[in-house]
Image (cartoon, grey):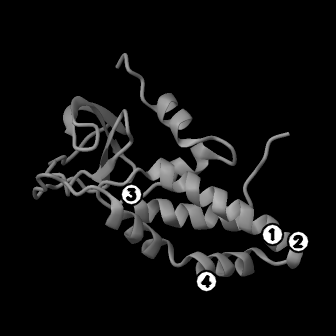
Amino acid sequence: MVKTLHPAVTAYLEQLERAVKQKIGVVPEEILCDAREHLQHDIEALNVCEPGLSTEQVHHHFITTYGDPHDVAAHYEDFAQPLLRAGKGYAPGWRISCTSCGRSVPAARAGIVRVGAASVHKYVLGWCADCHWLRWMRLEKDLERTNLTRALGAEKDSDTMRRQRHHPWL
């Protein structure tokens, strides 16, 4: 049996994903996995205590309990490693992430200039401040999309998803 997420959990995770992708130095997959576990545990307890709540009521409960998704994303950014050299760039909608650890930064904040491209993602060589290695970095246009929430689903963990997305032979 395939386990699915409650619509309120999905809505909160999508808002959180959009907010997290704008932050510097965070690992969106891990944050979404942690949040998903907390939200699923909370919804199970909520269904026992107060069955029959609407999706809007459950979503409001999540916001009052855990906070606004933008505040949660800002909290994670406070504990992330800062960029070593942040530059001015122009890459609307693009994000760069390490293929090994998953550390993510909006491309414009990292000093990348990307004007137009027909592709959705590219691989470039870059220095990861978290791994301290020169390695392949994934540059993808997904700042406004909520592709990670759907890809993680209800049971997949962040390491498995990252291994499936990043192919070392490319």
User: What residue is at 71 percent from the left and 60 percent from the top?
Assistant: 40
The image quarter containing residue 45 is bottom right
Q: Looking at the picture, how far across and down is residue 49, in whole percent?
A: 87, 77
The residue that disc 1 covers is: 45
Of callouts 1 and 4, the N-terminal one: 1
The 10 Å Cα crowd at callout 1, few under 14, some 14 to 19, many 20 or more, is few
10 Å neighbourhood of mark 4: few (<14), some, or many (≥20)?
few
Q: Give SS at disc 1.
A: helix
Q: Is residue 8 left or right of residue 110?
A: right
Q: Please report contact status of discs 1 and 4: CB closer than 8 Å, yes or no.
A: no
**Image location (x, y in percent) of residue 161:** 53, 36
Judge from the rendering whether residue 121 lies leftward or rightward of residue 113; answer left or right: right
- The answer for how far apart the CA atoms under marks 3 and 2 are is 34 Å
What residue is drawn where x is 33% and y is 49%?
104
The amino acid type of the residue labelled 1 equals: Ala
Gap in Å between the C-alphas at discs 3 and 1? Answer: 29 Å
The residue where tag 3 is placed is: 21
